[in-house]
Amino acid sequence: MEKRPYDPIASEAKWRSAWAKAGAYTVNLKKAKHPYYGLVMFPYPSGDKLHVGHWYNFAPADSYFRYQRMQGKDVFTPMGFDAFGLPAENYAIKTGIHPDISTKKNVATMIEQLTRMGCMYDWEKMVHTSSSEYYRWTQWLFLQMFGHGLAYKKKGMVNWCPSCQTVLANEQVKEGKCDRCGTDVVQKPLEQWFWKITQYAQRLLDGLKDLEWPSKTKLMQEHWIGRSEGAEVIFDVAHKDLTIPVFTTRVDTIFSAAFVVLAPDHPLVEQLTEEHHRGSVHAYIEDMKKKTEFERTDLSKEKTGVPLGSFAVNPANGKKIPIWIGDFVLAHYGHGAVFGDAHDDRDFIFAKRYNILLTTTIKPDDGRDDGKIRALEECFTGDGILYDSEHFSGLTSTEARKKITAWLEGKGKGRQVVQYRLKDWLVSRQRYWGAPIPVVYDPKGLPHPIPEKHLPWLLPTDVEFKPTGKSPLTESKEFIERTEKIFGKGWRPEFDTMDTFVCSSFYELRYLMEGNKKSFVDRKLEAKWMPVSMYIGGPEHATMHLIYARFVMMALKEFGFVENEEPFKRLVHQGLITNGGAKMSKSKGNVVSPDSFVARHGSDVFRMYLMFMGPFTDGGDWSDTGIKGIDRFVQRVWDMLMSKSAKGVTEDKATLTLIHGTIKRVTESIAGFRFNTAIAALMEFLNGIEKRESISLETAKTFTMLLAPLAPHLSEELWEHLGGKGFVMDQIWPVFDAEHLKSDTMTIVVQVNGKLRASIEVASDAEEAAIIAQAKEEENVKKFLTEPIRKEIYVKGRLVSFVV
RNA sequence: GCCGGAGUGGCGGAAUUGGUAGACGCGCACGACUCAAAAUCGUGUGCCGAAAGGCAUUGAGGGUUCGAUUCCCUCCUCCGGCACCA
């Protein structure tokens, strides 16, 4: 066959236009017989071009989906843009260019770059969340949530960056600082819209067990939801007609309760403060207010508090114990109040600091001396055996918790409860570049949902991009006029927009609708394609996007719009590509652009290089030193297949063994997202045929199919030259034949006292006795068999081990 | 502090129902081709040895085993998550 070097640049352009012309990636969602929904998390269209990190995410994902396609599946891999968000707005503030203009420009650039990668995206189904065709459904979702009582408005604390003059999404707060400018984030009370994700806490937890997700991610969600079983205990207040409910997971320690502590902002503080304590309590609360959330929650600082002067009655033993407020009690967890005792580290330290008298009621059950614990020199926080606890003395902590809870319940002083750490989702943002919340207020200030017929509720354009600290939409004359025109004089629109995580919480459903304006999602298509077969994206979304999307799907199921309750059946996270050990970012100036590498070596080389770096899920530090190796590999593939493959060659046994071994290894590697070892196996095949004159056309074609998911352009070129019909990506993946993997001989390793001394070649069907006998005859083994053999071990097909 | 994950040549990494550690690639050295260089090809690449062979070795230390990168215990380092959640 012909011999000329492979020109990746020309070849890649040729095949990309051939694929486009053939509509190779367009999926007929209604007619497809073997649906496979392969999804990668859609990117944010930033002004910077795609960097190496994007490639590391998208290209291997595409290789995996190409492999699925060759398994005979109708693979649907759509792509879109998470286009609303703060960066575009900040860019507008800086340059005056409207976010809609900059976003559209960025999207166009990114589509061009993504196409260049050679991925199988079905662009006909593209979504971008900032288009009104899309965000009308974001607004529709809000109305559904509102209609079903899952959206409500209340005053709450939000992260506020004083420098950017805007609220920040949780993910943009890193260690208490603004991710963009490094300013300390403060808490600010604002009236906000929330979605009741907490109502789904248990279902979100239960659903995890059936998901094929990385266990680490499931664990993170589990911790985030934070289920905690315990008891609510009611403390009466002495001489007052008030009660204080507290939450505890250690009701077994109730007999040692020595004080009650409320959060400084607990609603009962004022009523519980005695006259002569008023001064110190107010001073303490004022002091608290001055501190930032970051300072207040600093673990290394000492716990502080002041007594209120009033007393609570321990419902277990009737003892009067002092009521305090303290900075270590959180208002937003449980009831914002705890009882303190000697069996909790924090309470122990607090009591010591303020000389509150403690008693102990739990001793370790491992028989260890508890002198120091009783003497309050040491704090014991484990489960153990109760004492000084009336008729519960002698019980274990576990038994006692059940019995004491039941006993308190009988007295009307307690009950078993479950607490979650998860908080409701704050969805409003004081930003411009987001989906307007579809709510209007009547002249009395009462909120009303905007009727669906007015959707999309358009984002006004007559807005200045100066950060004033107010929602930019308040400036829009058109917005207010529109509202009054439709709803009446004195009516006002909601000026806040929605968190961009709302936009991304259902996009996988909109990909199925191809811009359909009539309905949110077609139930039949949803039942057919959902849940997403394989979802690929970064682990940083573990407790944000991935939990929101699950919540929204559950809610939609309950509303009756979808069949499925979980959006993503399988999930894999790509690793992070760093440069110089640091995450790539514009501000650090360490962003690596793939463009020059792609221009020089082609997309196939670049994507294979990224895959060859190591396991997909590991990521790694960027270095271009090895790219040459892949370049060589590509040329070698071309040279060898073109010069060696020939018609009419009958393949010899060794080559058959080689190619079938390669099929096995490449298949297992790709299926397990280990593209690095898949490429290594292909390289070994080349090394194996290097010395051979020729290989059969059949073998060459098989190799080309194995290469196809990894190097889509090159393999099409090879396929064409080898006389293959159609596209190689439409072929059915080869299956290895175990018969060909069998060899006539096998290598048996011989060990003496665990040390390798020789290896022998024996016939594959040799008997154990014969193999052992042969092993004993090896010169280098004999040498070490000077003493009588105590034991002979034979591991079938692997080794013989002698013990002397 | 708590919960996960990981530590293997000069470098990226391979190998785990316990069974030849270092596949594959980069880099490096030498050689071929060349006036020369690049590219390409060949050989080598833990240590000692011409070789046969020997020795060491998977973060550190201990244990189980004929045999441990793999299992158990103690510790160190790095990465990720949570962080006063009662």
Image: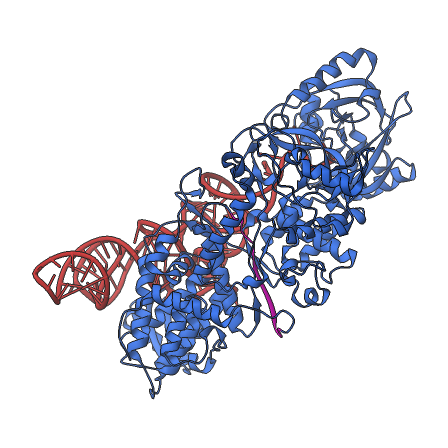
Q: Residue A307 magenta-drawn?
A: no
Is residue A653 visible in the rendered image? The answer is yes
Q: Quadrant of residue A648?
A: bottom left
Q: How is the image coloured?
A: by chain
Drawn side of residue A113 relative to residue A784, left or right: right
Drawn side of residue A177 relative to residue A384, left or right: left
- The residue under the point 83% across, 35% down is A233
Is residue A687 visible in the rendered image? The answer is no
Residue nearer the viewer, A161 or A465: A465
Report the quarter where the C terminus of chain A lies.
Answer: bottom left
Vertical position of residue A266 compared to residue A671: above or below: above
Report the quarter where the N terminus of chain A lies.
Answer: bottom left
Expressed as whole percent of the image width and height from the top left, the position of residue A345 reads 67, 30
Expressed as whole percent of the image width and height from the top left, the position of residue A437 reads 71, 43
Find chain A in the image and tell me its colour.
blue
Drawn side of residue A590 relative to residue A476, left or right: left
Residue segment shown in magenta: A32-45
Q: Residue A35 magenta-drawn?
A: yes
- The residue under the point 74% across, 31% down is A331
Find chain B in the image and tell me its colour.
red
Drawn side of residue A772 relative to residue A90, left or right: left
